[in-house]
Each structure stands twice: as structure tokens, then as C-alpha cells.
Image (cartoon, rainbow, N blue to C red):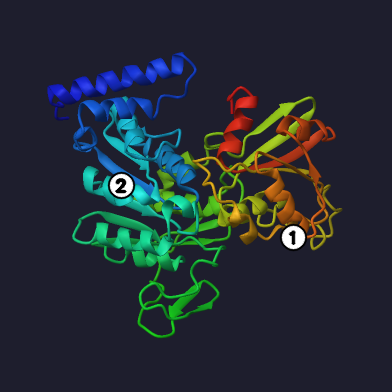
Amino acid sequence: MTQLPLRAQLASALGRSAATLSRLTGRGDGSVIGGRVGLMLEPDLLRQLARDKKLALVSATNGKTTTTRLIVSALLEMGEVATNAFGANMPAGHVSALSQGKEAPYGVLEVDEKYLPEVLDTTGAGVLCLMNLSRDQMDRAAEIWLLAQKWRRALSGKPTHVVANCDDPLVTWGASTAASVTWVAGGQRWKEDSWCCPECGGPLDRKDADWACRECTFHRPEPHWVLDDTFAIDRQGRRWQLDIQLPGLANRSNAVMALAVAEAFGLPVERALPRLREVKSVAGRYTTVSRDSRDARLLLAKNPAGWLEAFDVALGTSDGPDPAAAGLPPVRVAPIILSVNAQGPDGRDTSWLWDVDYRILRGRNVFVTGERRLDLALRLDVADVPFVLCDSFSAALAQQPPGHVDVIANYTAFQQIRQEFGRAV
């Protein structure tokens, strides 16, 4: 591996020291401040750190942290992997991650959708994984069609190999200028942001998973990989039972994307899949924590599409047989705690709550907390979902009977809940 120039070595070392100091003083995990210090001393540090690595970038509105973790787990079969495990997905976080893993031959970086063109241009990554695009933090990221357009421009003329979800029309459009693409039929449950053709603006006709524009030639590509319920079908037509530990249909989609990325690195399924099955939780997501005989499963949901997937996990709508259909006794429905903030990382605008169909929670004991609990309470009231309003997460948890409870929270609310449990999750 080529040695870094002296200035870059110094910037990297001081960045790592800043990160370590941040952790020791309890100010954070150091994944941002370390990169900021390094970039301040050497603005070209990200390019230099990425130069000799076989690098994959992962971007999407939902699931990029989990998919990054799955890809890393698979590639560990081949050697050490540098990654931004704590989700710091902008250039400062990337610098910190690559600096910490400076000797690793591989790198997998989660990248914020808005920053993807810049990071791709800077790092020259050989593989790019694109999974989904839906409305999220409109006050910061703006219209998602504009993001897809920026992706197209960033990929044009570059040798990067793209692994893309062809079930999402916006992702397909964004990836279609790439030199080579592995198309993955990973599914798209949230369709409210892709009823119109991004190429010409005409209506998209949909039939099952297939889609095509009614007014131009834009259509769903033929997939190389397919998610078929609990199976992944590879480009040779072989079926692989996923049986991963992460719950829900969205995570099975993430797993198929990860297998396709592993293939792009030359890692066969039979070596990658067992590694994916080892992943139990990701940065606290899906972890179950206990307090006073109450077992709380933590789920993260940041936007309408994410809430749809969180409901899928919490209500078990895609995992296991329906008890009534299978002639089994009904399963006791666990209570659910919902927590919403609107800080900077969440997006200040909470109008997206009105795009979430909360009626699915009728019949379940619902408790509402978070800094914007009144906004959420109004939305539930309009949806005719009874709820209990609580001043804090601790107060909401204290009202639960012994046993299981599901917790769905958006980003900063989720982090606050993790801190309440000592961030051991």
C-alpha cells in the first residue's frame, strides 16, 4: 500500500487523536470530529486515504446503515474492512473511518444521498450500491428527483460498477448512466414517490413488481438478482435461503443487495451468506433492551417509507404464518411506544407524519412521547388511533406490563433512548 504524504499522515494522526479524546471525554464516538480535524489540516485527505482501497459506497434514503453493516460482514471473509460503523455518512465521517482503518485493503462507506456525487468523485470508488429514494428531510435534501438527477450526472463517464434496486424507478433512473450495473429486484413497498416517470413525467404503469412508462421507453430492467420472499435468487438462477437474524422484509432486501455487492468484489454467495447471518443488530437497531421486567425492541424510522417498514417488523406482517390462517391461537399483541423529535438531523418539518398511515395500529396499545409528541398525537387522533400521551420515554416504558414492547423512534429520539440505556445497544 502506497504511503501517504507526510502532511496527510500528520492530518490523519491528529484526527485520530481528536476522535480518541472525544470518546474519552464522553463527547461522542469521535467519528465526526476526527474527520473534521483531518480535513482542516489536509483538505484532500479523503482522496488520499481512499486511493489504494477497494472501496464500495452505499446510499439510499432507508437501510444504508444496515446494508453497509451486512456488506462489511461479508467482506470480512476476504480481509480487514474500513467502515463508518456509527453512521457518520458525510465526508468528515468518511475521513475518520478510512483513517481508523488505514491498513485495511477494503472499505465500505455509507454515504448521505446528497453528498454521494462529491464522495464518488473524490474517492473514485469501484462499487456503488443504490437501494431506494423517497421523501426525507425535505427542508435539507430538497426534491428527490433532483437527487436522482445528481446521481445520473455523477455516474456518467465513470467506470464505477453500480448495484441498484431496479424495483425503484427513481433509483433505476439515477443508475442508468453507469458504465455497468447489476440490477437487483429488491422490492419497493413505498411507492408514493414514484408514480410518474422520471425521464418524461408520464404515468408509470405497474403490474406486480414490473413497471413501465406509458409515454416513453423507460421501463424496469431485467434483474440479475431477485428477492423472492425468504430466498435470494442469484444471476445463475440458484435459490439461497436467507434466514438472516435481522427481522422484516426490508432487511431481506438489504441482504440481497449485500450479496450482489459481495459478488462484485469476487466473493461467492456460499462464503458471503453465512457472514450475513451473523448480524443481529446494527447501531442499536432491532436490539432488545430490558428494564424492570420489560423487554423493549428498538426500531428506527425516519420518514414515511421507514415507518412502513418499522410497522412491518413490529406487527410481523411479513415474517411467519398468519396465526388465524394457520389455525393457531392468536398471538398477544404487544404495546408500542412511538417517539418523534424534530431536531436538525431529523429535519425540522414534521409534516411528513401525515404521509404515514397509522391506522394499522388500531387495536394496539399505543404510547406517544418525544419532543414533537403533540404533532404525532394530532396525527393519531385524525387516524382514529387511541393513544396515551407521555412526557418522556421512561414514563411511557413505566406504564407497560412486564413482557415485550416495541419502540419506534426517529433519529434523535432513537439516540436519546439508546443513551437512557447507557448506549450499550
Q: Judging from the image, what secondary structure is the residue with disc 2 in? A: loop
Q: In which quarter of the image is residue 17?
A: top left
Callout 2 environment at 10 Å: few (<14), some (14 to 19), or many (20+)?
some
From this view, report whether residue 383 is shown above or below residue 75: below
Residue 422 x %, y %: 61, 22
From this view, report whether residue 266 is shown above or below residue 321: above
From this view, report whether residue 352 is shown above or below residue 8: below
Q: In this view, does 354 lie to the left or right of 360?
A: left
Q: Residue 232 carries which label?
A: none
Q: In which quarter of the image is residue 325?
A: bottom right
Observer-nearest of 424 and 61: 61
Q: Name the residue under label 2.
A: 265
Q: Residue at x 77, y 38 (%)?
A: 390
The amino acid sitting under disc 1 is Arg
Observer-nearest of 355 and 100: 355
Q: Residue at x 37, y 51 (%)?
A: 114
Screen quadrant of the C terminus: top right
Observer-nearest of 164 and 22: 22
Residue 132 x %, y %: 45, 58
Let me know if residue 133 appears in the view.
yes
Callout 1 environment at 10 Å: few (<14), some (14 to 19), or many (20+)?
few
Report the number of discs: 2
Screen quadrant of the N terminus: top left
Q: Judging from the image, what secondary structure is the residue with disc 1 in? A: helix
Q: How far apart are marks 2 and 1 (CA)?
A: 43 Å
Q: Name the residue under label 1.
A: 359
- Answer with mark 2 or mark 1, whichever residue precedes in sequence: 2
The amino acid sitting under disc 2 is Phe
Q: Residue at x 64, y 25 (%)?
A: 421
